[in-house]
């Protein structure tokens, strides 16, 4: 530890360090920017840079400080971040530079560059990154500076600070295509006599001047239209990771250098037409991909997200409305266990917020009146009232859902396969290009260069990288239209592997209706009805809500204190110094009920007042669903209810099915864990309330719900209760999607094999190779789009 009196200079730039806290490898730095540059150089064994001159680096702090100063303003920070607590920030940026697997690898390994970055997840289709970091050590401004230093400057606009806007195609890309197309057309026009042998003698007199004009046209094309390929290749080589842009950049450079040499030395006219045509068609393919990405992202954002609702308070009346109708200043009610879907101020009630949905930390945090509560928190305890600060786009809420799952499952199979192929693809292509060049060297250096360029350009893993995201993206969109909402695309892969399905009973196989509710016991006075109404209003459990509806709407609320909900048992609270409990017979009376109906006991100060009975009604077409599922899956039922329904369920389920009753939430979790230990691929289907542990433990957790704002973030899939009978169709689509990805991989491999075979024989020009390259992507995208939608149409007709 350096003493405070001892001057410490930055190892990178030489400036004075204000403290000794920023260091790496026993070397001190004045800012995180200087340390990051050193770590990048050190990681890539380029630290001999420092041996050339003492402290040669540019001061990263002074270079960037003014440019991003606005990110230190609290009002700007509040608009940009999605979540904050005492230690962490969650923020999302749009990075238009993302375009290949190397980008994903670097951006998802930011924690290696700065340990205060806890997590970074990239959405490749949307070119967005979601970062969780410790704001006490790393500021938002410093995070943006780090991304910029790596070549991924976030696109932050004033529009973004106010609302999320739909991203449009990059204007610069349009200019690049326009320039390449203009040059390509004019160079071909001036080369027509040479192409067709027209008036050769006259052409020879002008060919020298035409060649210089072509050089002038091609130079801005190579360095402006082709700059993204060069930048990406350079960064890839710096990181010792070869991406697909490396062979393309080499092909462009070889064509330009060789053509320039021929013109300057007057030994030929060069290949400028091939160069400009190559870039024109490559960029056309890129703009096609961007438009497809935007279209798919728009479909996912605005049409396929689960329709979460929220309870709006207006003149003390409660109304359930979709979240997209909530406005700033609205008052909302959040009950025990409910997700807080918007940023809001606490205006009434005792708030104990479980932020595990957003941070993974489940210890409830107490909030005082006037405190700000961020979207993603879950209220534990009594109902609270909030005032909305800003509406939340549902895409951000779904991203919280996606990042919440922390299961043991490894990287998705197809994503892992794509990464492995991409890692070896470029080195193999470079080797094949060298071999092809050597083979054709006897035909002349010009022919050899053409062959090398064609090999480098025609081979492309882009179609491979697009296969899984587009297939699963279209499948998720179709499922969303069927009211089946997936946490993320990898869930489809897990669905395709399932061989064992476990069902909860109440709220999953059965549905409770108000007309099936009855009360037996002491007549309820107005005071008791008020107390009961106030107690059940704190809970989102379906039975609590049914009791509330049965009491009517013209009942005033009473203050509930010390409210607590015991999962699988019931609820309790104190109203006007009287203890009330409402729950199962086992919990309140310590005895099992043998009634075929579901019973809920109401107790006041230890005295049972009466019992609510709910007649079990099984879901529509349940017998047909179970019959069809049993042909391909092993089925199990685990329920917290008594065994009175066992005889009924035996009529629905085959003899080899296991039916278990009187199971607590902990028992359900143990059963799922036991099945997994037997190498079963388990899908758990429950109501998401008492089954959270089991849903999270299973390879696929499915929450069947009538009221989506009470869903469990532990699940992977949310299915509307009205669509439960279509569960087998959803599983079939998952299996079909897996097969479609495999077929698209085969198409991509065949394309590369055929294209490379022609290119290595010298039968393919660089321009034609550039045309074929985007065609492969178009073919795969078209195939998976048609195949998924056709399969979805077939399933919807059954």
Image (cartoon, helix red, strand yellow):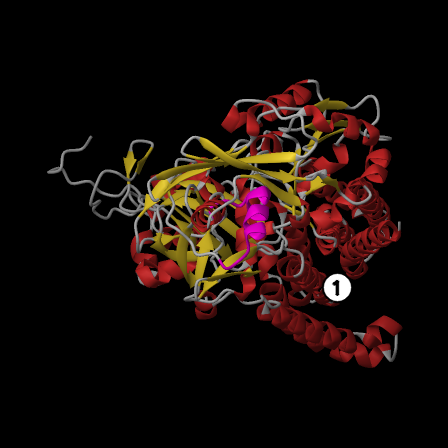
The magenta span reads 537-554
Give the image quarter of residue 736: top right
Up/down of 217 relative to 473, above or below = below
- The location of residue 290, given as percent across then percent down, is 66, 61
Tell me if 767 is positioned left or right of 233 in this view: right
Quarter occupied by residue 637: top right
Q: Residue placed at 62% from the left, 24% from the top?
A: 662
Which residue is tagged 1?
A: 274
Between 659 and 793, the one nearer to me in the picture:
659
Q: Secondary structure at mark 1?
A: helix
Q: Position of residue 272 (x, y in %)?
A: 71, 66
Specify whether residue 219 is painted magenta.
no
Q: Is residue 618 visible?
A: yes
Instruction: State the image coordinates of residue 722 (x, y, percent, origin top left).
Output: 73, 50
Is any part of residue 231 visible from this angle? Answer: no
Count of labels shown? 1
Q: For this rendering, which residue is in front, 48 or 612? A: 612
User: Residue at the location (50% across, 40% down)?
Assistant: 109
Q: Quadrant of the N terminus?
A: top left
Within the image, what quadrant is residue 284 found in? bottom right
Left/right of residue 604 with respect to residue 599 in the rendered view: left
Image x and y of residue 686, in percent: 65, 36
**Hey, which residue is sitting farthest front in the picture?**
523
Work out which residue is located at the far left of the displayed protein and give it. 5
Q: Is residue 552 magenta?
A: yes
Structural crowding at the residue carrying mark 1, measured as other residues with C-alpha within 10 Å and reported as few (<14), some (14–19) or many (≥20)? many
């Amino acid at each position: 530890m350096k003493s405070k009196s001892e001057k410490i200079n930055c190892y990178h730039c030489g400036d004075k360090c204000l403290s000794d806290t920023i260091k790496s490898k026993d070397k001190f730095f004045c800012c995180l920017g200087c340390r990051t540059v050193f770590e990048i150089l050190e990681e890539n064994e380029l630290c001999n840079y420092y041996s050339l001159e003492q402290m040669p680096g540019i001061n990263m702090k002074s270079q960037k400080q003014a440019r991003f100063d606005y990110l230190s303003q609290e009002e700007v920070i509040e608009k940009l971040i999605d979540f904050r607590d005492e230690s962490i920030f969650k923020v999302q940026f749009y990075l238009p530079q993302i375009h290949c697997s190397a980008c994903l690898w670097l951006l998802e390994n930011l924690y290696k560059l700065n340990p205060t970055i806890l997590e970074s997840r990239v959405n490749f289709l949307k070119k967005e990154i979601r970062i969780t970091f410790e704001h006490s050590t790393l500021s938002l401004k410093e995070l943006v500076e780090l991304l910029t230093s790596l070549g991924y400057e976030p696109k932050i606009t004033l529009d973004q600070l106010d609302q999320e806007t739909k991203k449009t195609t990059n204007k610069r890309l349009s200019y690049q295509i326009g320039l390449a197309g203009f040059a390509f057309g004019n160079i071909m026009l001036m080369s027509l006599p040479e192409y067709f042998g027209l008036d050769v003698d006259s052409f020879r007199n002008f060919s020298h001047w035409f060649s210089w004009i072509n050089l002038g046209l091609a130079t801005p094309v190579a360095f402006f239209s082709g700059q993204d390929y060069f930048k990406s290749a350079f960064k890839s080589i710096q990181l010792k990771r070869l991406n697909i842009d490396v062979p393309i950049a080499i092909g462009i450079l070889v064509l330009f250098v060789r053509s320039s040499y021929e013109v300057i030395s007057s030994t030929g006219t060069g290949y400028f037409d091939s160069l400009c045509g190559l870039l024109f068609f490559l960029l056309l393919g890129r703009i096609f991909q961007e438009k497809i990405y935007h279209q798919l992202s728009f479909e996912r954002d605005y049409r396929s997200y689960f329709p979460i609702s929220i309870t709006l308070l207006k003149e003390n009346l409660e109304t359930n409305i979709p979240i997209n109708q909530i406005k700033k200043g609205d008052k909302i009610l959040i009950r025990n266990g409910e997700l807080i879907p918007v940023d809001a101020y606490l205006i009434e009630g005792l708030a104990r917020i479980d932020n595990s949905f957003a941070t993974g930390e489940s210890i409830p945090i107490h909030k005082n009146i006037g405190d700000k509560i961020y979207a993603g928190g879950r209220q534990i305890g009594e109902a609270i009232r909030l005032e909305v600060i800003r509406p939340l786009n549902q895409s951000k809420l779904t991203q919280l859902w996606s990042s919440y799952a922390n299961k043991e499952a490894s990287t998705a199979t197809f994503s892992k396969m794509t990464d492995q192929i991409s890692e070896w693809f470029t080195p193999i292509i470079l080797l094949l290009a060298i071999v092809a060049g050597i083979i054709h060297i006897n035909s002349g250096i010009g022919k050899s260069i053409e062959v090398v360029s064609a090999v480098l350009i025609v081979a492309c893993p882009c179609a491979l990288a697009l296969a899984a995201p587009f297939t699963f993206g279209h499948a998720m969109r179709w499922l969303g239209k069927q009211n089946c909402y997936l946490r993320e695309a990898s869930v489809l892969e897990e669905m395709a592997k399932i061989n064992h399905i476990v069902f909860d009973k109440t709220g999953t196989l059965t549905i409770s209706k108000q007309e099936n509710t009855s009360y037996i016991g002491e007549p309820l006075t107005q005071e008791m009805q008020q107390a009961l109404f106030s107690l059940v209003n704190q809970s989102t459990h379906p039975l609590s809500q049914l009791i509330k509806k049965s009491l009517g709407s013209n009942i005033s609320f009473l203050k509930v204190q010390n409210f607590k909900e015991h999962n699988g048992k019931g609820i309790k609270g104190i109203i006007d110094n009287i203890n009330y409990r409402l729950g199962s017979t086992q919990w309140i009376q310590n005895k099992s009920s043998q009634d075929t109906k579901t019973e809920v006991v109401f107790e006041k100060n230890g005295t049972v007042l009466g019992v609510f009975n709910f007649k079990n009604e099984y879901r529509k077409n349940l017998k047909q669903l179970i019959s069809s599922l049993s042909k391909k899956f092993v089925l199990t039922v685990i329920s917290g209810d008594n065994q009175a329904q066992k005889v009924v369920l035996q009529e629905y389920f085959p003899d080899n099915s296991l039916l278990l009753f009187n199971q607590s939430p902990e028992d359900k979790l143990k059963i799922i864990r036991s099945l997994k230990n037997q190498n079963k691929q388990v899908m758990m289907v429950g109501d998401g309330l008492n089954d959270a542990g089991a849903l999270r433990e299973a390879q696929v957790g499915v929450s069947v719900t009538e009221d989506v704002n009470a869903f469990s973030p532990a699940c992977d899939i949310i299915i509307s209760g009205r669509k439960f009978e279509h569960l087998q169709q959803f599983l079939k689509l998952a299996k079909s999607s897996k097969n479609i990805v495999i077929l698209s991989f085969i198409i991509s491999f065949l394309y590369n094999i055929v294209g490379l075979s022609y290119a290595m024989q010298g039968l393919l020009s660089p321009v034609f190779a550039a045309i074929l390259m985007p065609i492969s992507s178009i073919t795969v995208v078209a195939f998976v789009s048609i195949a998924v939608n056709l399969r979805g149409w077939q399933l919807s007709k059954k």
